[in-house]
Image: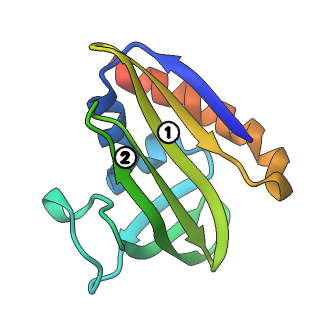
Amino acid sequence: MWITRAVDAPAEQAWDLLVDLDRWPTWGPTVAEARLDPRSPAGTGGRRLVPGTTGAVRAVAGPWVPFRTTAFDRTADGGGRWAWRVAGVPATAHRVEASGPARCRVGFEVPIWAAPYAVVCAVALRRIEHELAR
C-alpha cells in the first residue's frame, strides 16, 4: 500500500531530504539516528544513501539495527524510489515523483503485513512537508 502526500517543493529537494541520513530524525517519527557502515558506498558528503548502502538505524526507543538498501532508482525529473531491509526484513520503500517544477508527491510503500505503520508514515509525510517548506 502506498501512502502519499503532495508537497510544494521541487522533487530534487524532497529526494535530498529522504536520502540524507542526518535529516532522517527530522521527519521520521521513529528514527533517533542512523549511521553508515564504514565499508558501505558513500554518497555525496558521505552521509547519503546510494545504491548498495548498508548501515544501522536506531529507533527512538530501541537498539541499533542493520539496514541495507535493496532498490535505488533515480528519475530524470529529480525524484526516484529507494527501498530497504531493516534487520533483514523488507521495510518501507520511499518515492518522490515530480508533478511540476516546484511541486512533487512524496510517498511510502508499506508492506501489507505492516499496515498499522501507515499511521507513522502519514505523520512522516506531514513532517516532510514542513521540512521542505522551511
Identify the secondary structure beneath mark 1: helix
Which residue in the rendered view is the most extreme toward the bottom? 39
The three-letter amino acid code for the residue at tag 1 is: Trp
Residue drawn at x 29%, y 41% is 16
Residue drawn at x 45%, y 68% is 69
Percent x, y for residue 103?
A: 37, 14
The three-letter amino acid code for the residue at tag 2 is: Arg
Identify the secondary structure beneath mark 2: helix
List the residue tagged with mark 1.
27
Screen quadrant of the C terminus: top left
Q: Which labelled disc corresponds to residue 60?
A: none
Q: CA distance from mark 2 to mark 1?
A: 7 Å
Q: Is residue 65 left or right of residue 44?
A: right
List the residue tagged with mark 2.
23
On screen, residue 118 above or below 48: above
Labels 2 and 1 touching (C-beta < 8 A): yes
Screen quadrant of the N terminus: top right
Residue drawn at x 43%, y 64% is 34
Quadrant in which residue 101 is drawn: top left
Q: Is residue 48 left or right of residue 132?
A: left
**Mark 1 nearby-residue class (10 Å; few <14, some 14–19, many ≥20):** many
Percent x, y for residue 3?
A: 67, 33
